[in-house]
Image: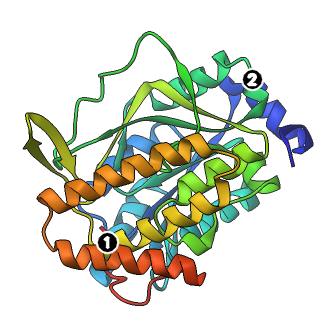
Amino acid sequence: MNPSDVSPSLQAANNSPASARIAVVLVTYNPDSSLEQNIRALLRQVDKLIVVDNGSEPAIRNAIETLASKWNFEVIWNGKNLGLAKALNIGVGRLLSVGDYAWIATFDQDSLVDSGFRDAVLGALAQCPFRDKVAAIGPQLLMRSDSAGANLDARNATASFAERKVVLQSGCMISAAVLRDVCMFDETFFIDYVDFEFCLHVRKRGFRILEATNTLVTHRVGAPSLHRFLNITCMVFNHSPVRRYYAARNRLRVYWRYFLSDPHWICHDAWSWFKEVIKLLLFEQDRRQKLAYITRGLWDTVLGRSGAYTKGIANQD
């Protein structure tokens, strides 16, 4: 299916961006105290928010319930961790059934939008000459190495959009028509590369991906730390072994699916992966265990295994 085959709502929404209605799916899994700040920032700029909780602990569920009553948003409770892709699809399915939203944005619990997020994203779409083919728009993501936030005013004032091959899921605004008529997220990925697989999938169908360059979303990934090596400062995310498993397995699955349609991006990503492993070996703890999980992820790809890993599922940082 290509853009011209999608329902006319895609063209209508993309050709009138200023009036577009935006809803958000935010997935939680034992969030920290920054959740309220992140939700408040979103509620100022969107028409509806649904939180999908992926099996948080009882005390944290109670805290989320309190926030939902205070700020008037809907919560969908999953009895256990169903994975990021499944949780996103649950929220997206709910929004597609209850409202006429042109765009559905997806967020992680630890991402904070700046005050101009909505205007910048819709402004990027308005300036895009091929907006009738745009499936998704991501913001600039600022990966932070602390939990105190960052400067959200450091925006690129020279351009409002740039075309990308992929964008990260958190903060990404996706066409509701594409989600309804083309595809949602591949639940067999569980977590990691869910977003990249989606972007590569819709691009293969003829759609295009934008980055709104005049807005920032700060995002905390893993347990980041800064290190210096040969006078170069680098950030290391210190992901848990089970996240190393998912990243390795799902990377290889993406490479297999999209090598013919996007070989340049895959080669670039493979180089980034190589550098990431080097940093793991130089700076991270539990190196042998993490390498063992990476090896297991690669082997499970060969065996055709997907979905949730059966061990260590509780720690997904």
- Quadrant in which residue 133 is drawn: top right
User: Does the rendering let one see residue 166?
Assistant: no
Q: Which residue is mark 2?
A: 130
Q: Which residue is mark 1?
A: 30
Left/right of residue 50 with respect to residue 156 in the rendered view: right
Residue at 33% x, 78% y is: 293
Q: Position of residue 134 (x, y in %)?
A: 71, 34
Q: Position of residue 236 (x, y in %)?
A: 20, 52
Q: Is residue 27 above or below residue 106?
A: below
Q: Secondary structure at mark 2?
A: loop
The amino acid sitting under disc 2 is Phe
Neighbourhood count class around disc 2 (C-alpha, 10 Å): few under 14, some 14–19, many 20 upward: few
Determine the residue located farthest toward the top in the rendered image: 158
Q: Quadrant of the C terminus?
A: bottom left
Whether label 2 touches label 1, CB < 8 Å: no
Q: Position of residue 7 (x, y in %)?
A: 89, 44
Between circles 2 and 1, the one closer to the viewer is 2
Residue at 48% x, 85% y is: 79
Q: Is residue 33 above or below residue 230?
A: below
The amino acid sitting under disc 1 is Asn
Spatial CA span between label 2 and label 1: 40 Å
